[in-house]
Amino acid sequence: MDFLTRSKPSGQPQSSGPAPYRVLFVCLGNICRSPAAEMVFCQALEQAGLQGRISCDSCGTAAYHVGQQPDRRMLAALKRAGVPYNGHRGRQFCRADFGRFDLIIPQDEENRGDILSLALNDAQAAKVQPMSRWFGPRSAYAEVPDPYYGPDSGFDEVVELLQDAVARLLQELKGKIGA
């Protein structure tokens, strides 16, 4: 199964139109990188007028910050970049997310491995694509760095990296959904 194949989330009522293509961003604690990717992507969807055609969420592989808001430093970096806070609260990845999302994007290789270890089949594993897949050709990064233990400037760097990657991701998805 091609990872960009659209699937109807299980348990969802059938509607007259196509189900939105659903994207899930994942990091470790769901307070820095993945909620930033979610908010940057939501802003890009709104600017492209694609809110009803593509939707997104984020979560963490660990339960450290379930129910918490994103890190204040990440929220400040997003605000400096003009990205609005969407009310996100941390949650943990679960196996059911394979059925709820069409594309699952871990921010680094450790989290990618954790998610793949939960996949029950090749179709689920094919949905897991690293965020680095959408980095620009001149990117200095192999994955989205975790800014949590570094200086505040690291949060700004992550937001900038995500804005660039999300623009490439959205262009690819627009082609796949016929937008």
Image (cartoon, rainbow, N blue to C red):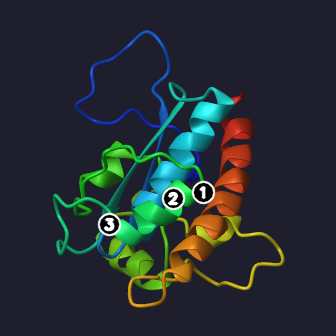
Q: Nearer the viewer, residue 90 or 92?
A: 90
Q: Nearer the viewer, residue 169 or 145?
A: 145
How many labels were placed on the picture? Answer: 3
Image-based side of 51 in relation to 47, left or right: left
SS class, disc 2: helix
SS class, disc 1: loop
Q: Is residue 5 above or below residue 111?
A: above
> Residue 98: image x %, image y %?
34, 54
Image quarter where the C terminus lies is top right
* 1 and 2 marks in contact (CB < 8 Å): yes
Q: Which residue is mark 3?
A: 30
* 2 and 3 marks in contact (CB < 8 Å): no
Q: Quadrant of residue 15?
A: top left
Image-based side of 26 in relation to 83, left or right: left
Q: Nearer the viewer, residue 53 or 163?
A: 163
Residue in view at x 48 percent, y 14 percent:
17
Q: Which residue is mark 2?
A: 78
Q: Residues within 10 Å of mark 3 (few under 14, many from 20)?
A: many
Q: Which mark is residue 81?
A: 1
